[in-house]
Amino acid sequence: MKIKFFSWKTILLFLAVVGPGIITANVDNDASGIATYSLAGAKFGYVMLWTVIPITLLMILVQDMTARIGIVSGKGLADLIRENFGVKLTFLIMIGLYIANLMTTIAEFAGIAVVGKILGIPAFAFIPVCAFLAWMLIKRLKYTTLEKVFLILIVFYLAYIISGFLAKPDWNAVGASVVIPEIKFEPVYFAFLVALIGTSLSPWMQFYLQGAIVEKGLKIEHLNFARLDVIMGSIMTGIVMFFVIVATASTIHGRIDVNNLEEVAVALQPLAGTYASGLFALGLFFAAFLGACILPISTAYFICEGLGLESGINKSLDEAPQFYGIMAFSLIIGAVILLIPNISLIPIFIISQVINGVLLPVVIVLMLLLINNKKIMKEYANSFIMNLFAIIGVIVLTAISAILVITTLLPQKL
């Protein structure tokens, strides 16, 4: 299918297809992602900016395979894994993903709580309201309408780009750091390097993207536009990552020692101005809120697909009670955990990182087997070149995941 750019038909068709790729990639810039980027910039300045381009390319590679599998097969990823690799493997992956997603959902509400604290709003008031709003959006809206809401929320990621400019960076130093990798042979540097890559590719992304593509009803004729959607989403994610690092590197690095998102936002105010601090907090809120919406949906997708149950936002509560029940439970647990006085979130985040680190290479290998299955993919299977890059990507991700698990279980002081 050839695409004739700059024709109204092409533009309208693309607008009808766009959504799953952009949403999935951008939601990966969630509360934990913003925290990782912020602390990397605060602690190392512009040094780690070189990672943005390879991480973006790796994301495009993996998400492109996910989109093709979803469109050509017309099935969700968990559904295909169950059909082709058996119930036992599907169940093991499902349990691991469920625990990891639940922990990540808690992390999203932790990000919301940080914004509430910055604004002076008590957590016991702010978090339940946000959880209820997320539930109402998911329950009340059909998929196409909900997708438009998510796309509108993504616009608020512009706050990070504006914050980056308000921080008045040294653009010559920024440019040099992007194109010339600077490696520091320090344990903390490698811990952040692994964390940057690990936070940019999570197993849940593949299940949500494929589930959204199937629910949206995209067909073979939409394939090129869906791939463009994935590319745009990955590039947008890379841009946000770039500007978050730039903002904190330009203002905080070498001046103040920060260890969490609240300290980052507060530190930005005297160093970069009230607007930069406010925009950073605004971006964090919408990033965390969007994640709090998407993670429960992803969880419900893969559990219901894996068990062969009815699923989909277009289904009513009566038609898919388990689907909505799983989402509701994830939201309730995510919100309630944050309201427990003096709870330590560190063990929760450690468990989440370890499980994601173990599962990601497994999920990618299964995707590679699926995308090279001619019975499923026909002429849309991977080419030799695509397989070569994908295998290299799997090797890199496996190594990174192994290091991530080790450094998480044996943490260095950051």
Image (tube, grey):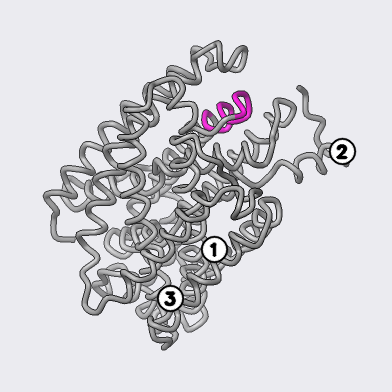
Drawn side of residue 216 relative to residue 381, left or right: right
Q: Can see residue 56?
A: no
Give the mark, 3 or 2, whose residue is nearer the N terminus: 2
Q: Amino acid at mark 3?
A: Ile
Label 3, label 2: how far apart the Cα atoms are: 43 Å
Name the one closer to the observer, 31 or 348: 348
Look at the image and give the residue range highlighted in magenta: 65-74
Badge nearest the viewer, 1 or 3: 3
- Pick the quarter of the image with the C terminus: bottom left
The residue beneath circle 2 is: 9
Q: Amino acid at mark 2?
A: Lys
Q: In the picture shown, does residue 60 fall above or below 373?
A: below
Q: Residue at x 39, y 45 (%)?
A: 50
Q: Residue at x 81, y 42 (%)?
A: 11
Residue 340, how many percent across, how many down? 27, 76
Badge nearest the viewer, 1 or 2: 2
Label 1, label 2: how far apart the Cα atoms are: 32 Å
Q: Residue at x 21, y 77 (%)?
A: 342
The verdict on residue 72 being magenta is yes
Asked whether disc 1 touches disc 3, contact meaning CB atoms under 8 Å apart, the reply is no
Residue furthest to the right: 8
Name the one closer to the observer, 314 or 247: 314
Q: Quadrant of residue 230?
A: top right
Residue 198, how many percent across, how many down? 33, 45
The verdict on residue 100 being magenta is no
Instruction: Say how many tags the image has.
Output: 3
The residue beneath circle 1 is: 161
Return the mark for residue 127: 3
- Pick the quarter of the image with the N terminus: top right
Tell me if mark 3 has few (under 14), some (14-19) or many (20+) residues whose alpha carbon lies within 10 angstroms of its own.
many
Tell me if mark 1 has few (under 14), some (14-19) or many (20+) residues whose alpha carbon lies within 10 angstroms of its own.
many
Q: Residue at x 60, y 53 (%)?
A: 318
